[in-house]
Image (spheres, rainbow, N blue to C red):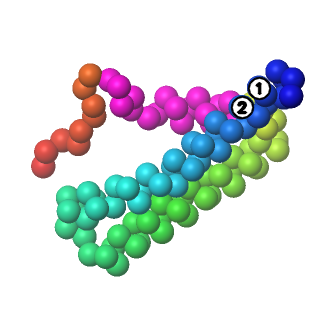
Amino acid sequence: MDSRKKAILLAISIPLIMVGIDGTILNVALPTIATDLDTTSSELVWINSAYIITFGSTILLSASIGDKFGRKRVLQLGCSSSSSARPCPASPTSWTAPAS
């Protein structure tokens, strides 16, 4: 495989990994959400469903925008905005919600 094909494979693999991680973020956070917000299991299902619907509609919207303005440009914009919106776990002070 030449270097151009490897670069293309890497460019497509990174967003796929990001989507996979996004799919697990809420499921990992559900126990903390349940204890902090004192929610029932049915409310957790609603939270999970709302996240999945929002996430799926964002993917559909991005695909439509990609068809109009170019898939490469939208992919680069989505990856950069998604990466910049995430807090860096290696930062000395991590973000925490204010105490209520």
Q: Is residue 67 left or right of residue 15?
A: right
Range covered by the magenta-colored residues: 75-91
Q: Which residue is identified by label 1? A: 7
Does the magenta stretch mainly form a helix, a strand or a loop?
helix
The residue shown at (86%, 28%) is: 1
**Is residue 88 a member of the stretch shown in magenta?**
yes
Label 1 crowd (10 A; few <14 / some 14-19 / many >=20): few
Q: Nearer the viewer, residue 13 or 58?
A: 13
Secondary structure state at the residue bearing disc 2? helix
Q: Quick one: which residue is furthest to the front in this view? A: 1
Q: Which residue is identified by label 2? A: 11
Q: Is residue 82 above or below residue 39?
A: above
Mark 1 is on which residue type?
Answer: Ala
Q: Is residue 35 above or below residue 6?
A: below
Name the quadrant containing residue 82: top right
Mark 2 is on which residue type?
Answer: Ala
Q: Is residue 36 above or below residue 87?
A: below
Q: Quick one: which residue is furthest to the left in this view? A: 100
Q: Are marks 2 and 1 in contact (CB under 8 Å)?
A: yes
Q: Position of residue 99 (x, y in %)?
A: 13, 45
